[in-house]
Image: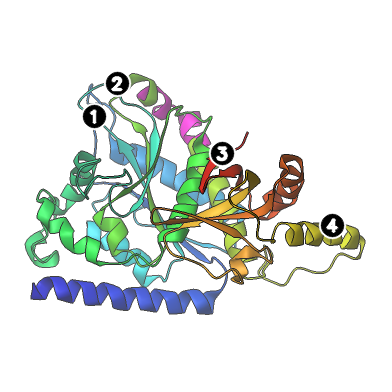
Amino acid sequence: MKHTIRIILSLLLSVAFSASAYADGLRLGTVVIDAGHGGKDPGCVSKDKKTYEKTLTLDIATKFSDLIKAEFPDVNVILTRSTDEFVELRGRADIANRSNANLFISLHINASSSTSPNGYSVHILGQSSQKNRDLFAENMDIVKRENSVILLEDDYQTHYQGFNPSDPESYIFMSLMQNSNLEQSLLLASIISEKLKGGPIKSDKGIRQNPFYVLWRTSMPAVLVELGFISNDTDLSALRQEEKRAELAKRLLGAFRDYKQLYDSSLGLDRDGDSAPADPKGSAKETKQETARESGSKSADVSGVLYGTQIFATSKAIDSSDKRFLGWKPQVVKIGNLYKYIIGVSSSAEEARKNNAAIKKEYPASFMVQIKDGATSPLK
């Protein structure tokens, strides 16, 4: 019990330190890309034993890193490994924590005992994302597999204070930690999931919450991406192709670009980190958008059918004056423990679509919804 408390206090301190660095650094200046597995840990292996997860993740991570460096030379991109080497699970998170990273993205390839499952999925820290399920009821096989890397480390019982990746009871202390970065992790996960659609890996397995140790130990917004199933012939065929891996890296870059834009714009910064200059020719446009902001800020009768644009969802309430809303006054729809923030709300779908045109420029990952009887549904 003392060991568990010590771990929790240590993580709380690291989270506090990261929050301070976030405030001081302002822009999204550092991202850590984690190529899953490596060295003596091959990760998942194809049935013919010719393709290893560790090789695929390193190639995609390297391509992703190079693309960010080329487009954003001011961003510090750190790879947890740049060669086929074994990096301890705790070491991967420690690299991100020591560098005061703003973002941690861990890349993996999934596997199943059956050849049927296929597709990509994006994971954030938390309990099972399915209602009425406990922490271990969903995706526990994948959680155990990714966390089992611990067993390959020397003296792991000392380093991990008795944490056993095969024992569900070892995960209980994770649920005691409140992830202060959950909403940002969820935002990034939704953007990545959207960007991967229509890519080399066709099936979208969705966004899920799981107790991955590497996500729990990091003290910044973090996601773990499973880029297909090595056990599925179709996914494996795509993953074995150089151009397909390059496309996956480009789609990840697109997600990073959109997330960075939201991150920096929420601080009133443009791409170069300076205040955006005023456009004298844009006054009419600004006036039109300001009118849309005002029309979308009025409290509406939630008993009727409304339309608007959902910009993000969080696990805790956010004040309507928060700078992340960029001047919009959101309507909040609470479903379970999730707060959905919707702006540009109107009883007219046509008017809401006009508002959406302006909103999409500020929130590229947003989408239109219908609000009815206290619930939301996507609007096509």
Sequence-first disc among 4 and 2? 2
Magenta span of residues: 236-247
Q: Is residue 242 magenta?
A: yes
C-alpha gap between disc 4 and disc 3: 25 Å
Name the residue tied to disc 4: 288
Q: What's the CA distance linking mark 3 and mark 1? A: 31 Å
Residue to which mark 2 is pinned: 116
Position of residue 304 measured from the top left corner of the image (x, y, whole percent): 62, 46
Toward which corner of the image does residue 162 lie, by quadrant?
bottom left
Q: Looking at the image, do the residues carrying marks 1 and 2 touch, with CB atoms under 8 Å apart?
A: yes
Q: Please name the amino acid that badge 4 sits on.
A: Lys
Residue found at x 23% / y 51%: 86
Give me the residue at 38% from left, 20% from top. Answer: 234
Q: Can residue 78 be seen at all in this image of the molecule?
A: no
Q: Which residue is mark 1?
A: 112
Residue type highlighted by circle 3 = Pro
Residue 42 highlighted magenta (yes or no): no
Dot 4 and dot 3 residues touching (CB under 8 Å): no
In the rendered image, residue 193, in percent from the top left (x then y), is placed at: 48, 41
Residue at image point 25% right, 40% down: 139
